Amino acid sequence: MAMNRLKRWTSFSVPPRELSPAESLQSQIRKQDFVLGSFLVPYIIMLILEGMPLLYLELAVGQRMRQGSIGAWRTISPYLGGVGVASVVVSFFLSMYYNVINAWAFWYIFHSFQDPLPWSVCPLNANRTGYDEECEKASSTQYFWYRKTLNISPSIQENGGVQWEPALCLILAWLVVYLCILRGTESTGKVVYFTASLPYCVLIIYLVRGLTLHGATNGLAYMFTPKLEQLANPKAWINAATQIFFSLGLGFGSLIAFASYNEPSNNCQKHAIIVSLINSATSIFASIVTFSIYGFKATFNYENCLNKVILLLTNSFDLEDGFLTPSNLEQVKSYLASAYPSQYGEVFPRITNCSLEAELDTAVQGTGLAFIVYTEAIKNMEVSQLWSVLYFFMLLMLGIGSMLGNTAAILTPLTDSKAITRHLPKEAISGLVCLISCAVGMVFTMEAGNYWFDIFNDYAATLSLLLIVLVETIAVCYVYGLRRFEGDLQSMTGRNLNWYWKIMWAGVSPLLIISLLLFYLSDYILTGTLQYQAWDASQGQLVTKDYPAYALVFIGLLVASATMCIPLVALGTFVMHQLKRGDAAPVA
Amino acid sequence: MLWLLFLLVTASHAELCKPDAENAFKVRLSIKTALGDQSYTWDTNEEYLFRAMVAFSMRKVPNREATEIAHVLLCNITQRVSFWFVVTDPSKNHTLPAVEVQSAIRMNRNRINNAFLLNDQTLEFLKIPATLGPPTDSAVPVWIIIFGVVFCIVIVAITLLILSGIRQRRRKSKGLPEVEDAEDKCETPITVENGIPCDPLDTKEVHLNEAFVPEGERLTPL
């Protein structure tokens, strides 16, 4: 078995999945506050304090134990096999809901081959006198997302039926994933090379295009100016820490699985540092692209807003066409206010205050808005079909890359266990996993599906991962023993463990994670109940609603099912040991 | 006398065409926005063209074929450029009902727009809503076609991989018994090249290759 593993991975020294930009961009999409003016500083600090040490820890454990996550933790301590099981459960949840994003990416790609793009114009209403009402109130991109793609219902209680269009795309997404994992790790490795390198190419193309867009510099200036008052807000640090977690893939078990294929003498310290640096460089690179496109969109909207005000004033006062320009707008406004006070007073309520800052500040939340923001920017570019196809193809590659990592984390323990491989060939096992996840994923294609998706997105992974990583760190440092682990590493790689890593593993990182957990809990207790954003078709915007009781129970189950694995398996092992001791005693 | 008549005519014109008069419509043009550098100035000649276009639209309405350019009156021309217009009947005493004018303009909106190199947004008739163009819809939505293509490719690829996997496994499980069979039979195969059978390797007799002289015979013994 060990020889097999060595053979399969000797061709690469660094498993390409770890270099994949998948996690970093996908975590940006998943992140709560996409646009934080000063996210760079907390991000870098959290990377050094949390990301690198924990990444090194997981790689070292995998390389030392040479087994998947369940076996590795069982070797460290028989009572801690539950950590591996919890990782598999979290990976399972993640794979269930994450492929829906790929389905949406497919949907948008297929719709990008039209002129004009379907999300750039509003459809007409029934008697062709104007545009559809919902589309008028919201924007055409929002309408396309909420009505055409999701066909979303007003609240989570109203389920609606399964929509056949997104369901078809979801089936296609799962078929593509199955195609890639069909042959096991060898084929997955080759596919990951492709899915990891292609997004870089597209990112470079987008970088060049993005930086040459009108207004891109506004977005970049916004990104790089630190907002000191936001640094004081703990939420910024929490978000940075959570993003590091997702971006590096800590706690999913996939790192341990991939590291177990490495040679024992592999220098995993260098590995960890290189991977985390490449990962953060990719994150920053992707952010530059994102912010330049964001700046373009904000500038475009700002100029549109100004033009609307100019048109309104020109029409109300019958000024000469072309007389009012953005540069003399303020002067003319004050002149008009003094010269025609009554008329100006009538028009005044309809004049919106246009501000570039306000456009840049619009916080982007949730996965859906990541689609909306980009499509809005793309529809204003020239040759928008090309840019749209490129962008969503890149998104698809990233998504499939992440899915491959997740499914590998699930399949490795399944294919490792002899009980299952004796009865079923590995194609059938992968097929079964894909089929079950696809069937469950149909829930997300219903009319209320996007609300359930948000539940999974917000609660399935965050708390459980934090707990898993905390238990991992404590297990290695205190249960297995830091000195023992240090000795193992030295005999394996021939290098001494630096004092920096020892301090991080034993002290700083666990403390950080505990404070993160406490923050989440206190946040929940303070706000009382959990709320979600629902789309109101009559107003054309999102409204906040409370979760119903059964949704809250479901959230509790989600978090509990992953975290309870750890104590349950520990208890089970303890009970089995007692029973064995009880059996052995009479015999002796 | 003539002076009085002229006064009367202009007075009646003023009566018929004024802002918010009955059956009057306001028109707004944004020439600079639409054409930028290539914009033309709005002068009396352009006004004449406008009146001609309106008269042309009215002539297309049944019962109004006798409408002349002189029947279209413009007033309150501002620098915006905006103005009001009415269409009078041949007697020049009454204005034609708004409904007729509205439907006539709507029918010929495209022609009027093109005469001035403008579009629905830059040549506005307030209170006359434009008919929006119908969306071009193909019979089969484009996305289903592309979806179908990708779907078929993926299915074919999966089938190929599964089949090759099954074949590999079958070859491996049949591999061991096949090797034993070959050793039992021990037949020397006869290969045919270009219709001439090659001489099989004669393993029974021993042939000496004279080129290799045995070592001992070359060297003289000590």
Image: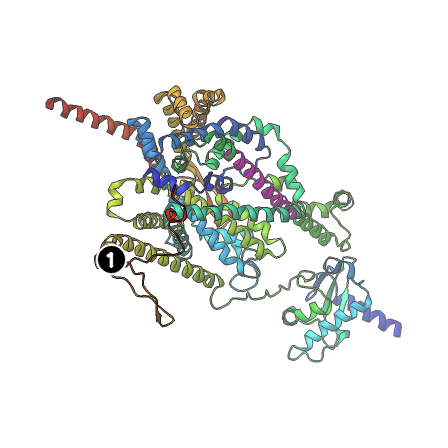
Question: Which residue is rendered at x = 74% and y = 45% of the image?
Answer: A329
Residue A124, position as x, y percentages in the image: 54, 61
| Image position of A203 with respect to B50: above or below | above
Query: Pointer 1: residues within 10 angstroms few (<14), some, or many (20+)?
Result: few
Say which residue label 1 marks.
Answer: B182
Describe residue B20's horizontal placement relative to residue A15 as left or right.
right
* Letter of the chain that mark 1 sits on in the rendering: B
| Image position of A263 with respect to B53: above or below | above
Type of amino acid under label 1: Ala
Please identify the quadrant where the C terminus of chain B is shown: top left
Give SS at disc 1. helix
Please identify the quadrant where the N terminus of chain B is shown: bottom right
Comparing A309 with A253, the one in front is A253
Describe residue A519's horizontal placement relative to residue B171 as left or right.
right
Q: Give the range drawn in magenta.
A: A275-302
Comparing A239 with B118, the one in front is A239
Question: Which residue is rendered at x = 29% and y = 27% of the image?
Answer: A79
